[in-house]
């Protein structure tokens, strides 16, 4: 009898080992495929090798990536096992979960980032931000110009929600208040960039302190703290005047709250204070980035199903955030402020790109009925000419905005049929715009534009001439970081958008399954990045901010599992103590 039990145990061990190998390959293979295709398509948007060769290379690379993941997992486990065997100096560098420590470490980060803040004073921006500011002015102002719209479509409104209306109001208030007080936008926008940098530093400090409090090795927290302070992409993007830099620290804090919720197995939802804070930052995530609501609501809904004891509290969170965005905003706020809703072309951009690439590749094979269906939505005659592999705007901004539902139905039927005819083309159409997010070639981009008069902007915005030397030095530092071997890995978008999440997923599944629900917002955010209309570092900023913290949370899971196994800590007792603690800091 005992021999049968031993044999059964051995069989189960073999089955489990095989399952782990298959899971590791299932994680590594998509990463390898995206890396190979993204690298091949990065420069031109077209594949430079035969598909068979690319898939062969991806197959070989899969095993290399799997080996790297295993090596990183081994290093992480050793770090967790020996987390108390390092110099006590690391206590100074790793934030602790107290108001004093969080603020002190945030001030250190802010001091390190001030180089970028001052160098690009009053804060670099995109055209989007300049447009948002101008949109905020009265219609009779010389600065104001009409709301964004699909070319050729007239909109009778003062504001457009093409960019989140809350961000527009924030930038508009800062610029107009500054102009009234000083005669320019500089002071207001620099103040906004300064506050934003400080808030971002506080969010990072709180996130790392939370991870350490959960059991993450202080060595890892200290290393992440140092890298966040010194790697240029963090300090530079924290001070930019653009909606992504407003959204990302809010998302980082919300993500940290979700990590605390997962760590408590949903029990924290019973805390009134935590419930309110989570709701507030969930709503802010949705209000400051168009994709935010599609991360927050599904995450809360999924967690409501996972943590059934708190299902109605988490369900209420999802309903509240969705209600604000899909009911209150369009039904009450937009009419009151005269806001035109954003167009649907942003969501449909990847689908439009697939059709356009198919037309380029197989134009001679498309029959008259299919051409007519495409023409009714995307203007077939110029579609092939408008297609740019790495940029979706030329195609999506020429769609037929007033197409009938019958036309849309016919178009989607053709889209589905052509996708089945040549899925390779559709896959390449999706990879081409986001190659920089999945390839080592996708280095972080320096943002040095200011929409002053020299760029076709306004005289209300200027660069201080006495900071020209500092701007040049900052530019050289940023470029050196993207070009110096080893260091440049820390400046690659793929590290944060793909590679670290893949590693953390394996670590959690293999070593700490209770943390798997944390990958719901991770998967949704990565998905949003991979649906971007082009490669721009700012689209990956939420993952650039959260990936290092995610690594710390996963390490906390590994460390806490080892502690539970050795000390017999009761998870339910831990949950109850977490609830009674409320919201730290």
Image (cartoon, grey):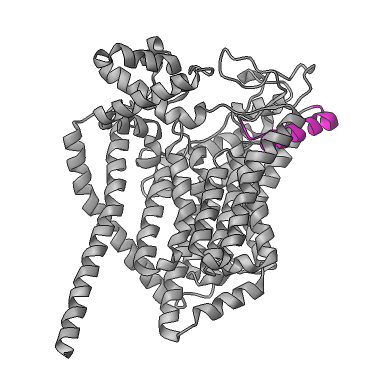
Question: Viewed as shown, does residue 571 lie left or right of 3?
Answer: right
> Extreme bottom residue here?
2
The magenta segment: 163-183
The vertical placement of 540 against 547, above or below, is above
Vertical arrangement, residue 266 with respect to residue 487, above or below: below
Is residue 168 highlighted in magenta?
yes
Res 563 → quadrant:
bottom left
Magenta span: chief secondary structure: helix
> Is residue 549 at least partly visible in the picture?
no
Is residue 149 one of those drawn in magenta? no
Q: Quadrant of the N terminus?
A: bottom left
* Residue 102 image offset from top left, x and y in percent: 65, 63
Residue 241 relative to residue 43: left or right: right
Q: What residue do we see at 79% from left, 18% from top?
A: 141
Residue drawn 59% across the image and 15% down it: 153
Q: Is any part of residue 408 visible from this angle?
A: yes
Asked whether, in this view, residue 321 is left or right of residue 395, the answer is: right
User: Residue visible at 60% across and 68% down?
Assistant: 268
| Residue shown at 61% from the left, 50% from the top | 319
């Amino acid at each position: 009898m005992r021999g049968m039990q031993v044999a059964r145990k051995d069989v189960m061990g073999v089955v489990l080992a095989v399952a782990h190998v298959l899971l590791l390959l299932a994680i590594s293979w998509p990463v390898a495929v995206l890396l190979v295709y993204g690298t091949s398509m990065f420069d031109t948007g077209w594949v430079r090798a035969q598909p068979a060769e690319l898939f062969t290379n991806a197959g070989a690379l899969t095993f290399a990536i799997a080996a790297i993941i295993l090596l990183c997992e081994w290093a992480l486990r050793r770090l967790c096992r020996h987390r108390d065997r390092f110099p006590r100096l690391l206590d100074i560098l790793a934030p602790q979960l107290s108001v004093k420590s969080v603020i002190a470490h945030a001030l250190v980060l802010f001091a390190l980032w001030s180089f970028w803040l001052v160098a690009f004073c009053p804060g670099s921006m995109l055209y989007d931000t300049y447009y948002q500011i101008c949109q905020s002015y009265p219609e009779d102002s010389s600065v104001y110009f009409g709301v964004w719209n699909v070319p050729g479509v007239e909109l009778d409104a003062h504001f457009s929600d093409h960019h989140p209306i809350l961000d527009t109001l924030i930038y508009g208030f800062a610029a107009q208040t500054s102009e009234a007080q000083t005669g320019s936008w500089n002071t207001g926008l620099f103040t906004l960039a300064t506050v934003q940098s400080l808030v971002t530093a506080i969010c990072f400090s709180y996130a790392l302190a939370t991870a350490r409090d959960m059991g993450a090795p202080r060595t890892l927290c200290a290393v992440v703290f140092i890298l966040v302070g010194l790697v240029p992409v963090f300090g530079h993007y924290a001070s930019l005047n653009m909606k992504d830099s407003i959204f990302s620290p809010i998302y980082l804090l919300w993500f940290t709250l979700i990590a605390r919720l997962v760590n408590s197995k949903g029990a924290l939802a019973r805390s009134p204070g935590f419930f309110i804070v989570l709701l507030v930052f969930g709503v802010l995530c949705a209000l400051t980035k168009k994709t935010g609501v599609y991360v927050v609501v599904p995450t809360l809904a999924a967690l409501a199903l996972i943590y059934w004891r708190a299902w109605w509290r988490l369900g209420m969170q999802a309903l509240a955030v969705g209600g604000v965005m899909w009911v209150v905003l369009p039904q009450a706020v937009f009419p009151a402020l005269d806001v035109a809703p954003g167009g649907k072309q942003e969501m449909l951009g990847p689908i439009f790109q697939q059709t356009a690439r198919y037309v380029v590749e197989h134009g001679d094979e498309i029959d008259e009925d299919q051409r007519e269906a495409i023409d009714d939505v995307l203007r077939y005659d110029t579609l092939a000419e408008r297609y740019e592999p790495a940029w979706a705007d030329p195609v999506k901004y020429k769609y037929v905005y007033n197409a009938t539902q019958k036309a849309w139905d016919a178009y989607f039927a053709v889209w589905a049929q052509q996708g089945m005819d040549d899925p390779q083309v559709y896959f390449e159409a999706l990879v081409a715009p986001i190659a920089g997010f999945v390839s080592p070639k996708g280095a972080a981009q320096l943002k040095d534009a200011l929409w002053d008069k020299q760029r076709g902007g306004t005289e209300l915005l200027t660069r201080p001439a006495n900071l020209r030397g500092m701007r040049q030095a900052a530019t050289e530092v940023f470029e050196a970081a993207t070009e110096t071997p080893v260091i440049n890995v820390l400046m690659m978008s793929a590290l944060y958008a793909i590679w670290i999440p893949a590693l953390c997923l394996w670590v959690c599944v293999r070593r700490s399954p209770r943390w798997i629900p944390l990958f719901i917002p991770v998967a949704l955010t990565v998905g949003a990045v991979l649906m971007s209309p082009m490669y721009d570092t700012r689209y990956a900023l939420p993952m650039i901010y959260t990936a290092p913290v995610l690594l710390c949370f996963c390490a906390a899971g590994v460390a806490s599992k080892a502690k539970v196994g050795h000390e017999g800590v009761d998870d339910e007792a831990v949950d109850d103590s977490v609830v009674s603690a409320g919201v730290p800091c």
